Amino acid sequence: MKVLRRQDGFTLLDILITIGLVGIVAAIALPSVGTTSRGFRLKGDAQAVANIVSLAKMRAASRYSRTRVRADLANNSFRLEVWVPTNAAVKTVGSWVTDGANIPLSNGVTFSVAARTVAPDNTQTVLGQSPTCSDDTSLVGNKVDNNACIVFNSRGIPINDGGDPMGGNALYISDGASVYGTTITATPLFRQWWGNATTGAWVKQ
């Protein structure tokens, strides 16, 4: 005689408990995942800024021309520009020409020092972005609002409007939780920093 065995399945209560547990685990994990993802985006942008500053320095020496990294503080983007004279014999006539693409910062990342007030050691006397850029057709003067520039001479030395070596150049980006800074001195000593958005020591990367 064939005996039928009872086959029990999951009850509605079992399923609801399982769904509840999955929901709790997801609620705990998702904020951590979001924070990690945001941190990776900020670090990637910081590396991109550092790379383009380094490239501008090398490009100036290789082309024997002035170059600059121009940060658009309003639109949160940056690019490399090269000074191209209209007449090689007249160095003051010409224009800044974009070399490569205009690079946007990631969503949620801006050019900012957040709530920090003190610059990294031996970099700037006053914490802040590099000086304002000149417009596209001048080496000096005719400043453009909401921009910051690090300008290199033909030897790859950061300079001011008068063409003199200049320390204290920096570009800072933040996601509201952390700040990354790329600094370059007159020597030129190039460094990258990380810090909390509010206080605490800067950490050299």
Image (cartoon, rainbow, N blue to C red):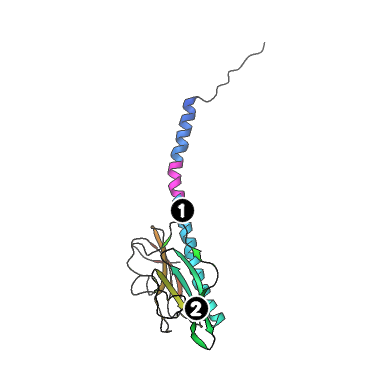
Tell me which segment is drawn in magenta.
26-33
Question: How far across and how far down the image is residue 163, in percent?
Answer: 43, 84
Relative horizontal placement of residue 133, taking residue 117 as reference (left or right): right
Is disc 1 surrounded by few (<14), some (14 to 19) or many (20+) residues within 10 Å? Answer: few
Residue at 46%, 41% (x, y): give it: 26
Relative side of 189 to 2, left or right:
left
Name the residue tied to disc 2.
95
Give the residue type that dot 1 points to: Thr
In the image, residue 11 lies in the stretch drawn in magenta: no
Q: Identity of the amino acid at label 2?
A: Ser
Residue 192 pos. (x, y %): 45, 69
Q: Tell me residue 104's x, y (percent).
A: 48, 62
Instruction: Give the image quarter of residue 195.
Output: bottom left
Q: Quadrant of residue 100?
A: bottom right
SS assignment for the magenta stretch, majority: helix
Q: Which mark is residue 36?
A: 1
Distance from Cα at disc 1 to Cα at disc 2: 42 Å
N-terminal of the pair, mark 1 or mark 2, is: 1
4 sits to left or right of 172: right
Quadrant assignment for the N terminus: top right
Secondary structure at badge 1 equals: helix
Task: Tell me the residue at 51%/66% (across/down).
Answer: 102
Point 47% across, 37% down: residue: 22
